[in-house]
Every structure is written in C-alpha cells, then in structure tokens.
Image: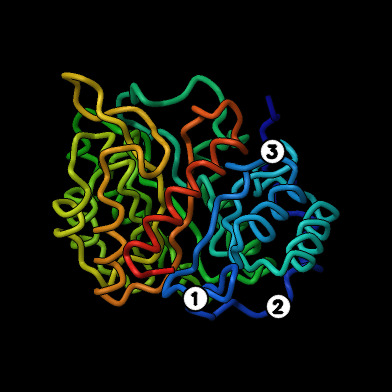
Amino acid sequence: MPHRVPRRRFLRGMGALAAGTVASSVSSWVADGAVSPFRVAVINDEISQDFGHACEVASREFGMNWIELRGMWNKNVLNLDSKEIAEAKRILENNKLRVTDIASPLFKVDWPGAPRSKFSPKRDQFNADFTFEQQDEVLERCIELAKIFQTDRVRCFDFWRLENPGPYRRAMNERLLNAANKLGQNDLILVLENEGACNTATGAEAAKVLGEVKSPHLMLNWDPGNAASRGETPYPDGYGLLPKNRIGHCHCKDVAKKSGAQGGEWAAIGDGIIDWVGQFKALKRDGYHYAVSLETHWRGAGTAEASSRQSWAGMKDDLQKADAL
C-alpha cells in the first residue's frame, strides 16, 4: 500500500516540466482513417499498470489518439516523480497520444464534521490515499500536471456519500466553486464525476449540483454506468435532465442488471443494460465533442487488458452504429 505523501514534499520537484500548451483539438482520429466527433479514449490503467504497454495497446491496437491518465507503475498520477513524468511524456509522444484529462482523486474523501460515510474505503483506491487536509495541495498538483501533460481539464468528485448530505451541501458546493474558479484562473476546466459512492451519483443529482454551482469552469464528467449502478436509467432519463453545455467528459462502461436488485454489476460494453448507441447518438446530436473514455471496470475476461479489449470491441461497435466512428 502506497505511503501518504508528506505535505511539504507533495508539490516539490515539478516546476521544470511544467512548460507546454494546452491541447485544443476537438476530434479524435482513429484507425483506418475513421473520424469521430468525440475524443475517443481509454483510461490507461484499465489496460495495464505498465504505461508503455497501455499506450501501445490504446494507440496501435485500439487506434486511439487520446488517453486518460489515472495511475501507472503502481502509482497514482499525482505521486509520479519528475523522472517518471518525463518518461510518461516520452511514451505519449512515441505513441502519438494526447491526454484528455488528469483523472485525479480530488475531493474523494470524507467531509469533515459529518458522520463517516459507509462508502469511505478502508484502504487506498487507485493508489491514492490523500486526506481532506491535503486537498488544496492535491488541487495545486492537478493544475501542475494538467499543464505538464497539455490537457485542459481535471476530474474531481464531491466527497464520500452521506445518508443525508443536506446540512453540508452548501459548503460542498462552495468547495467545488472555489476549486473550479482556481482552475479557471489557469485556463482549465474542473469536471465533476457522478460516482455511486459519492454525493453526486446520478444524472438527477448532477443536474441539481450544476444548477447550484454556476461557475463556467465546472462541467460534468457524465458516467452513465455509475448512474445505472444507483438504479437510474442513464439514457434517456438521467441524460435528459442534464444541461448539455455543461457536459465536459464522458466515461464509458456497462452494467448488468442483477435479478430483483437495484443497480447491477459491471459488464462489457454491449452486454449490459445501458443504451450506448442511443447515448452516443444523443451526444453527437447535442454537439458534444469532448472525450468518450473507456473505463472498463468489468474484469470478466480474466485480466484488465483482456477485459478492456472485449469492452472496447463493444464500445467501438456502438460508436459505429451511432455513426460516431
């Protein structure tokens, strides 16, 4: 289990790598000359912790030009040292891959003073183990990494889910607003993921938060799989509630319905209950042109890599059926 990064060392040693311009292309060229209105991508560690191998699979086998960064070499992206970052940049360049976003664990912590969430993990997740007190430093690190990896957006959450978030919601929203505005000062976008274990889990909940936090620098990382895992029908129901101009990222995975149960368990895309063809068509119709990023989660093929291959086959087929690839 990775050790917690000491506060005084958390931001050290990165300044020399921070030069570069922010990526701005809005389309993702893929294999065989096909073009998508979306930035077709995969989260790198859904393939492998070996970053070089993950990038080769994404670029040369999946035909992608974009990748989402979360963790590599058994480290969270926020914990990479300067040599590892230089190596990651070299690998990205060699594979002609651009970065959709920094998939950070920002605000994936308990809210102070509230009852401890039943979703609060007993160990780190995705090799991240940061405290609430470290979140300002996490934010600064995210800004630094976004500039280094030449992306214009950073992913966040809104704290482990509470039975009754009402008494804390205004303060949570203020924290989101402040973070979004801080990113905006750096020409970056904060994308809030709807996550089943956090206080914004569904399209309905996301629409409410976006209505209350009106910063132009806060957008949604729309995750239909996470919404489905909380019992919502993500498309068309949850999606229909969202302000389309506030969707800034999209995660792609699928859910298999459990018999007689709310929600479900992960599935390969195309084998679950989510209408991804309809969702991709709607995103295209509504002028969305940011990432659609494979976040497999399902491990039914035995390994992360094999499962991601199978799920990508389903995702690619659904994109083609939606005339989006």
Task: Quote the CA–CA distance across marks 2 and 3.
Answer: 26 Å
Indicate the amino acid at tag 1: Val
- Looking at the rendered image, the disc whose residue lies closer to the viewer, 1 or 2, is 1
The residue at which mark 3 appears reads as: 5
Left or right? Give the position of 174 relative to 184: left
**Residue 26 locus on image (x, y percent):** 48, 78
When asked about the image quadrant of residue 89, the answer is: bottom right
The residue at which mark 1 appears reads as: 35
Numbered label attached to residue 20: 2
Q: Give the secondary structure at mark 1.
A: strand
- Residue sitting at x 56%, y 50%: 43
Left or right? Give the position of 8 relative to 256: right
Left or right? Give the position of 15 relative to 45: right
For marks 3 and 1 on the same chain, the one whose residue lies earlier in the sequence = 3
- Looking at the rendered image, the disc whose residue lies closer to the viewer, 3 or 1, is 1
- Residue sitting at x 20%, y 52%: 235
- Looking at the rendered image, the disc whose residue lies closer to the viewer, 2 or 3, is 2
